[in-house]
Image: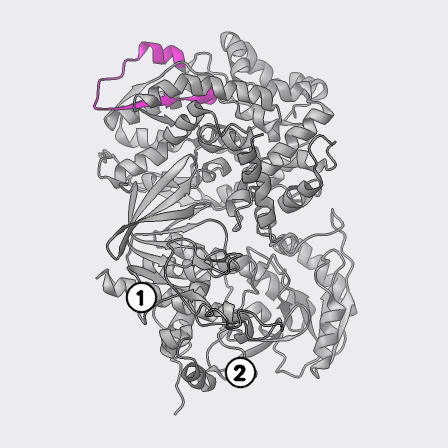
Amino acid sequence: MTEVLHELLRGSLDHCVKCTICETACPVSNVTPLFPGPKYAGPQAERYRVDDEPSVEWSVDYCSGCGICTQVCPQGVKIAEINAQARHKLKEQKGVPLRDRLIARPSVLGRLSTPVAPLANASLRSRALRVVGERVLGVHREAPVPRIAGRTFRSWARRHSSPAAARRVVYFHGCGTQYYEPDVGEKTVAVLEHNGYQVEIPKQDCCGLPLQSNGLFDDARKYVLRLARALAPHARDGALIVGNATSCTLMLKRESREILGLLDDPDLKLVSERTYDVCELLLELHDRGELETDFQPVEKVVAYHAPCQQQGHWIGKPALELLALVPGLEVRELDARCCGIAGTYGLKREKYDIAMAAGADLFDQIRASQAGLVACDSETCRWQIEHATHKPSAHPIELLHRAYRL
Amino acid sequence: MRPSLNYDVVVVGAGVAGLTAGARLAEGGARVCVLAKGVGSTHLAAGTVDVLGYDPDRVESLAAAMPAFVAARPDHPYALLGVDAIAPALGWFAECIERGPQVGYRYRGGVERNQLLPTAVGAPRPSALVPETMAAGDLGVDLPVCVVGTRVLREFHASLCAGNITRLGIEARAVELKLDLDRPEVNALGLARRFDDPAFRRDFAARLAPLLEGDERVGLPAVLGLRDPHGAWSDLQDRLGRPVFEIPTPPPSVPGMRMFEALRAALRAAGGRLVMGARVVGAEREGARVTALRVDTAGRETVFGARSVVLATGGFASGGLALGSDWAVRETVLDLPLRGVPPPGSPRFRAEYFGEQPMARVGVAVEATLRAEGAENVLVAGAALPGAEPWREGSGEGISLTSGHRAAELVLASDGLAAAALSGSSGLGPLRTET
């Protein structure tokens, strides 16, 4: 780790005044005694973690990495980032289970399963096979898994030609769009084109976020740097990079640089500065008076959940502002913090119940909201919400796409 | 740099002052965005509204004490704001709580008489406006008290609290209730989440009832529900058949979190934005005006354009002010001129912890209109204002609430924004200045 980064993260723990604000916001420690909370595992336990000495505090494995602690800390302590590094060190010491190595590679899983999608989908929904998967691998039998689309977003993108326009963006689609929800990608491209962007879709792979959350830092670095190399030339040409997978755009913007210690990589730095969450970009467009507002009515009651990682962009909730522009659409803001899934956390046998308990407030609010649909910017959160509430969930961009009648 | 987003008003800080200003501005029709680097003072304070507790003797009637207090301190925020600004602010706040997300929950009191509530260590704390769930703890009432503690909440010591209440001349005793939880200890929030559950309350009341005696009232740590405090509190009163009151705990403060949720909900309901985690790192200026704030967001700076700015960043404790090892004091967001910095050679601090601390009076230099010197469209609210020693005066929330509310009214008036009428009946009446 560079000295600068060391100062940035570890140095911040001296700012902790033990005010407990992070503990009030932690979705995990509020529902299980297995994780004593961000203050304890972070700034307090960090004082006992010494470079090159074994990890002395193992509860940090139960931190889901949602990042809310850092967001609410009034003193600027990088709690979640400190804990992510502690989790990495712990996993190096204890060893990383095969399960974590597998579920942290969505693009590998996607590539393998796409050609055999019907079989893969049937297997993932077979009770018997899921029980076996739980026993052998440790993936909880009930955990939400996406439906494999059987076609990739890139196969559509290769055939698609974006009309020439004065403004250019590079679309970073992420693995969820590529293998599971290609239609969300097609709608994102359509909304961007409708707003006068020429959309380029360079070849790309996973951002490495699931590897990072599972403590596999070396592999995560390889993935994120490879992605940065693919995107940087476009950024250097002046294009903005825009994505709909909000946790993956956050990985590019901030998390990989801080958590993986990549502050000095020039490609990643450039990509980080030029990357936008799609709703963030559209809201800025609207503020300049340049957003197309030919929205047709969508008569619907929708609940909106801002995922933890979306909140980690530190940009508020731009999706709410955008959805408010759609006539007929009644949007109810949910203020429960977390759905519990945290990417791959809620898939794990020993953590599934914790994840479901962490999301219980949100699920209650969704049920009470009477909404027919839950809008949410992150795919794994949408899958968890659908799993827990049996209500359909969509990316906000899908609602805008419908309102534009594209 | 060209702003990415433009607002009528950007408020910096999400404590009582910032959220009050933001919510009131949004209600008044302003396009407002509240930026905060994190959660503010609410989660750490008692959840009461203390307007003026000591001058230096304990204040019983605010209305009687306030004129002399401000006359003796022309540099105090209350002198700047005018005592007439206090009651409307408190009235707005009380209403904001009533229409807030915690159904039925309300504050009691006003500017006529301070209520005297026990703190976690049983010391009397004079407060103007208190949650209904605390009101029955008034130590001005001569009714015996039973303070209930539980070992799972280690930061609340019932016997210490009861012992100190006894020293005030009120009969008090402590009982400890055994609770079976899934963990050996829990913080106030963890218990409050359980009290939101009627089944937990039923069980709790059934265990407690046999331990109570005579006509004693029941003091509990302030954990009676986060989402449904009114339900939890009235349920317990019904089940125990006697007055029940909450006693503020060390942080995290559940009543403070309720206050945060109510103010946040008011801001959101009126269309205001709240951006958490966003640290303001600089400003764009044109002459004496601040035209935009540069904000550290993930990946890059985002520029928030603003016609007016309300600075509610707090004092030294919140990082709104910083004191260097060279004794230089600075305002950390806009580097605004300060007032009250002890001149070289004069004392900065005194040895007595609760004595007068000159450095604590430092704040951003403002005019009577709350405008910062050197930045004509920046108004200052809350603990960033100079001239107060809130912990000695017992005035923190009063100053934050009144200045946040007043700053909003001033911006609405000066910007020609649709200044909505002061929110209806304040219910508290104007603060009378005795003649």
* Chain of residue at mark 1: B
Quadrant holding the C terminus of chain B: bottom left
Q: CA distance from mark 2 to mark 1?
A: 28 Å
**Numbered circle sitting on residue B211:** none
How packed mark 1 is, by other alpha carbons closer than 10 Å (few <14, some 14-19, many 20 or more), is: many
**Numbered circle sitting on residue B59:** 2
Same subunit, tags 2 and 1: yes
| Numbered range of the magenta stretch | A154-176
Judge left or right: residue A261 versus residue B70: right
- Identify which amino acid the numbered label 2 is placed on: Val
x and y, in percent, of residue A60 in the image: 67, 36
Judge left or right: residue A202 versus residue B136: left
* Residue at (61% x, 58% y) in the render: B251
x and y, in percent, of residue B76 in the image: 42, 75
How packed mark 2 is, by other alpha carbons closer than 10 Å (few <14, some 14-19, many 20 or more), is: many
The residue singled out by tag 1 in the image is B409
Picture layout, residue B355 above or below residue B405: below
2 or 1: tag closer to the N-terminus? 2
Q: Is residue A162 magenta?
A: yes
Direction top: furthest residue: A115
